[in-house]
């Protein structure tokens, strides 16, 4: 009875945020303008603010003229200065943490500064809004009658680590009470040992919600099912009602989650990263996400085609159009200014502003002018998987280049949870669906002149897991790169066959 009262009280409090969300939905441009100038004001006394004359900026056009568009490489030296103790580099606010974001390659890690303002009014605000939106969409929820599992990352040093580790370590007490297992286990460095302990420590808990990257959460759930010799996760956690997910596309994993959750679980997608919390799926009947406009993040955009041609024609929200791919630039309350985050999105609505993630600026294939993005390959695989009643665990694609005047082709490595009966038929349909989804790919495939039919290698079970482990990239926000213009990833993976 006490748990029911607690659930009722917390949900009623959390729901109150909806009126503020409606405010920025109704006044998006005004709210974004206010966000921008609050950030500029806090940056006046910083090195960056003085260098680019923040005190002279009186309009958005001034901001565009004064402040350059940057990538991480452009600010890396100053971030290292900040890590080494230099003060007021990007903002007057003190940088308390650095979120380590390294991707899946052998390149150097990125260290993203996080201030207290950014932690509280962006990341944690996003977490609370996530719950607020969920409770409004599902008024009979019992989410607070039980606990939640979040597969956390780990720390490199006292104030540097995976974003999830920083968030978990600084969660308010009321949130910690609703999480399991304890922080010591959740923040362990050894990912495989962490998974084992989460499995053993949580099977007797009343788990109502889980959150994390789909690939790693699926790994955890499958291990629990296998270790306990049950058919589905609801036999262990009958009150599990929602999976809050983000980090990678959910499309390749949804069928598997439906199966192990007996089609009786809700899904809610978020778009958050080391740099900030950006969007939340606010409509349970639609899989696009509401862009959150009052989190201390100002948004700008570059059309993807212009970006790849090094043509930086930058626009703000008022000029975006639906169904056009954009590269995102962010200005944040942690001191990032006109920063290219590396994600691409398209708008499904401009009233209110809603988006879907279409890929990454570095994960695409345009070797032959085909401009294939992750959104294309995910959708094509989803269609084929449903038709052939198969399940995909992981995949990556790379070009095989033209040789001796022979056409090139796309080379796929796919690891199936359940294989199609005929891989050749699957391949034919995959090629056809990609052509339906991408006219550039269709044009290059015509008569096999430029691109021949794709080639699919079926990977053995756990091939991608072994590859990620070899890179020391298990857990956290690490993910398998779906597409690449070179053959580095695919050659390494093929060696594991």
Image (spheres, rainbow, N blue to C red):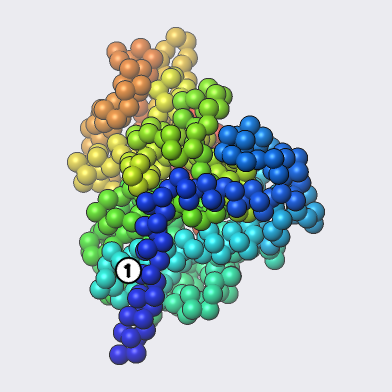
Q: Nearer the viewer, residue 115 or 205?
A: 115
Q: Nearer the viewer, residue 90 or 207?
A: 90
Q: Position of residue 468 (x, y in %)?
A: 52, 49
Q: Position of residue 479 (x, y in %)?
A: 49, 48
Question: In the figure, is residue 324 to the left or right of 479?
Answer: left
In this view, the residue farthest toward the top is 405
Please tell me which residue is depicted at 54% across the width and 50% down the height of the picture.
34
Q: Is residue 73 visible?
A: no
Q: Is residue 285 visible?
A: yes
Helix, strand or loop under label 1: helix
Question: In the figure, is residue 436 to the left or right of 183?
Answer: left
Q: Position of residue 408 (x, y in %)?
A: 42, 19
Please tell me which residue is depicted at 30% across the width and 50% down the height of the picture.
287
Q: Which residue position holds label 1?
A: 135
Please tell me which residue is depicted at 36% across the width and 81% down the height of the picture.
9
Q: Position of residue 354 (x, y in %)?
A: 36, 46
In this view, the residue farthest toward the bottom is 1
**How would you rate the neighbour count of disc 1 (Cα within 10 Å): few for under 14, some for 14-19, many for 20 or more?**
some
């Amino acid at each position: 009875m006490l748990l029911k009262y607690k659930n009722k009280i917390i949900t009623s409090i959390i729901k109150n945020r909806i009126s503020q969300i409606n405010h920025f939905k109704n006044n998006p441009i005004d709210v974004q303008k206010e966000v921008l100038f609050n950030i500029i004001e806090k940056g006046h006394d910083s090195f960056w603010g003085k260098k680019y004359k923040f005190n002279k900026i009186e309009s958005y056009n001034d901001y565009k003229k004064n402040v350059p568009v940057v990538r991480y490489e452009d600010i890396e030296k100053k971030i290292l200065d900040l890590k080494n103790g230099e003060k007021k580099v990007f903002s007057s606010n003190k940088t308390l943490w650095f979120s380590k974001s390294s991707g899946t390659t052998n390149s150097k890690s990125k260290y993203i500064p996080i201030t207290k303002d950014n932690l509280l009014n962006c990341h944690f605000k996003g977490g609370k809004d996530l719950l607020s939106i969920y409770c409004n969409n599902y008024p009979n929820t019992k989410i607070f009658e039980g606990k939640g599992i979040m597969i956390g990352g780990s720390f490199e040093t006292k104030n540097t680590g995976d974003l999830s580790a920083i968030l978990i370590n600084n969660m308010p007490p009321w949130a910690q009470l609703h999480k399991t297992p304890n922080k010591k286990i959740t923040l362990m460095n050894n990912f495989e040992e962490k998974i084992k302990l989460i499995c053993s420590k949580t099977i007797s808990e009343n788990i109502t919600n889980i959150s994390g990257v789909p690939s790693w959460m699926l790994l955890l759930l499958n291990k629990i099912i296998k270790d306990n010799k049950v058919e589905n996760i609801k036999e262990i956690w009958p009150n599990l009602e929602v999976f809050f997910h983000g980090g990678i596309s959910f499309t390749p994993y949804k069928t598997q989650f439906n199966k192990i959750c007996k089609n009786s679980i809700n899904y809610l997608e978020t778009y958050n990263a080391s740099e900030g919390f950006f969007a939340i799926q606010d409509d349970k009947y639609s899989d696009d996400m509401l862009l959150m406009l009052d989190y201390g993040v100002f948004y700008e955009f570059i059309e993807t085609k212009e970006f790849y041609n090094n043509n930086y024609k930058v626009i703000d929200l008022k000029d975006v159009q639906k169904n056009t791919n954009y590269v995102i630039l962010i200005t944040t309350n942690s001191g990032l200014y006109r920063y290219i985050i590396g994600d691409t999105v398209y708008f499904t609505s401009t009233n209110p502003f809603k988006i879907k993630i279409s890929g990454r600026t570095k994960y695409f294939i345009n070797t032959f002018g085909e401009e294939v993005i992750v959104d294309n390959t995910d959708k094509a695989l989803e269609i084929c998987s449903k038709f052939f009643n198969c399940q995909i665990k992981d995949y990556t694609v790379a070009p095989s280049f033209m040789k001796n005047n022979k056409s090139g082709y796309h080379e796929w490595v796919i690891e199936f949870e359940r294989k199609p009966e005929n891989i050749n038929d699957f391949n034919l349909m995959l090629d056809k669906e990609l052509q339906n989804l991408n006219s550039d790919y269709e044009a290059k495939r015509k008569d096999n002149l430029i691109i021949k039919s794709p080639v699919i290698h079926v990977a053995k079970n756990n091939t991608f897991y072994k590859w990620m482990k070899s890179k020391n990239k298990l857990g956290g926000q690490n993910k398998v790169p779906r597409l690449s213009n070179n053959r580095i990833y695919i050659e390494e993976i093929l060696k594991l066959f």
